[in-house]
Amino acid sequence: MNKIQIHPDICNGKPTIAGTRITVQTIMEFLGAGDSISDILEEYPSLTEDYVYACLQFATKLMARSYQIKEIA
């Protein structure tokens, strides 16, 4: 089962944890603010560590892509 899903009708198409309305962005923001996985699991008791790691893996795969900065008018 995929732990991360993207559906256009859920959270405006942002990647979410499967079966929830918790976005990958939300989890990454908690981690970026210095919260621990334990802190996140306390805030969202329906999640497990595996879901947090799935968010990290998803973000890592996004960053592995090639990006270009283009000037637009």
Image (cartoon, rainbow, N blue to C red):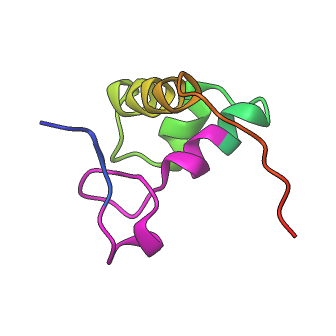
Q: Is residue 65 depicted above or below 30 in this figure?
A: above
Q: Residue at x 75, y 33 (%)?
A: 32
Using the image as rendered, state which of residue 64 and residue 55 is in the foreground: 64
Q: Is residue 53 magenta?
A: no
Q: From the image, which quarter does the N terminus lie in? A: top left
Residue 53 vertical position relative to residue 31 in the rendered view, above or below: above
Q: Quadrant of residue 37?
A: top right
Q: Which residues are magenta?
A: 7-28
Identify whether 14 is placed above or below 73. above
In the displayed orientation, state which residue is furthest to the front. 73
Residue 9: percent from the left, percent from the top?
32, 78
Residue at 36%, 41% (x, y): give it. 47
On screen, residue 9 versus residue 1, left or right, reads right
Magenta span includes 15: yes
Residue 39 lies left or right of residue 1; in this view the side is right
Q: Percent x, y for residue 66?
A: 59, 28
Expressed as whole percent of the image width and height from the top left, the position of residue 5 reads: 29, 51
Quadrant of residue 3 within the rendered picture? top left
Residue projecting furthest to the left: 1
Q: Residue at x 36, y 33 (%)?
A: 51
Q: Nearer the viewer, residue 16 or 33?
A: 16
| Residue 58 percent across, percent down from the top left | 43, 32
